[in-house]
Amino acid sequence: MKVLFATGNIGKYHEAKQILARYGIEVERVDLDYPELQSDSLEEIAAYGARYCAESLGQPVIVEDSGLFIEALNGFPGPYSAYVFDTIGNEGILKLLEGEENRKAEFISVVGYCEPGGRPVTFTGEIRGRIAEEPRGEEGFGYDPIFIPEGEDSTFAELGVEEKCKISHRTKALERFAEWYKNNVAGR
């Protein structure tokens, strides 16, 4: 079984490849630059992206959109996480949280799947945690150096990709997709 993953993010691709391999699903990356719907809903963004890519490629495809939701910042950066990261980075997020005791946060990932002419299906995964006081760790990408998952003392970047892929928000969303895919699409 093989699925196309439309993403320009190599880190996401490697994680998806590792996670979906457990289900016997091979992942092929397609670097398709598609317009991102401006919405407060990750589900809407992923569904739109999946439909757009499926129609553009003429093949079934998955996309993934994720966001970091920080409680003390009223859920910011949320669905705008990629833009915020590119603009102010981890240092900017830490600056916004300076002096803040409440560092609770949640990472949410939504995988969208669509076939050409079909309706998109979305799969959500989440993980609670907190924002570190400073960036820590060398592995991963994006907010990994500042996100500490619940039950851990290490950031995602300190845990490393293999450990992260056992517990992450993206893992949960991709596992939900994989189960659905095997039961509803594979073998058709």
Image (cartoon, rainbow, N blue to C red):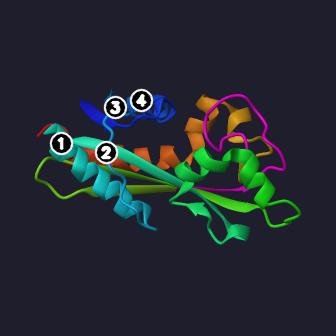
Mark 4 residue element = helix
Q: Is residue 124 left or right of residue 99?
A: left
Element carrying mark 2: loop
Q: Which residue corresponds to the image point at 80% horizontal and 49% vertical from the top-left?
A: 132
Disc 3 marks a residue whose amino acid type is Asp
Note whether 77 is above or below 27 in the view shown. below
> Which quadrant of the figure contains the N terminus?
top left
The reply to whether the C-beta atoms of the residues labelled 4 and 1 are less than 8 Å apart is no
Residue position for label 2: 34
State which quadrant residue 33 falls in: top left
Amino acid found under the numbered disc labelled 4? Lys
Compare marks 1 and 2 and give the one earlier in the sequence: 2
Report whether residue 158 is seen. yes
- The spot of residue 18 in percent (x, y) is 46, 29
Dot in front, 4 or 2:
2
Q: Quadrant of residue 181?
A: top left
Q: Position of residue 125 (x, y in %)?
A: 49, 54
Residues under labels 1 and 2: Cα distance?
9 Å
For disc 1, the marked residue is 56
x then y, percent, for residue 134: 83, 45
Which mark sits nearer the N-terminus, 4 or 1?
Answer: 4
Q: Is residue 164 magenta?
A: no
- Residue pointed to by mark 3: 31
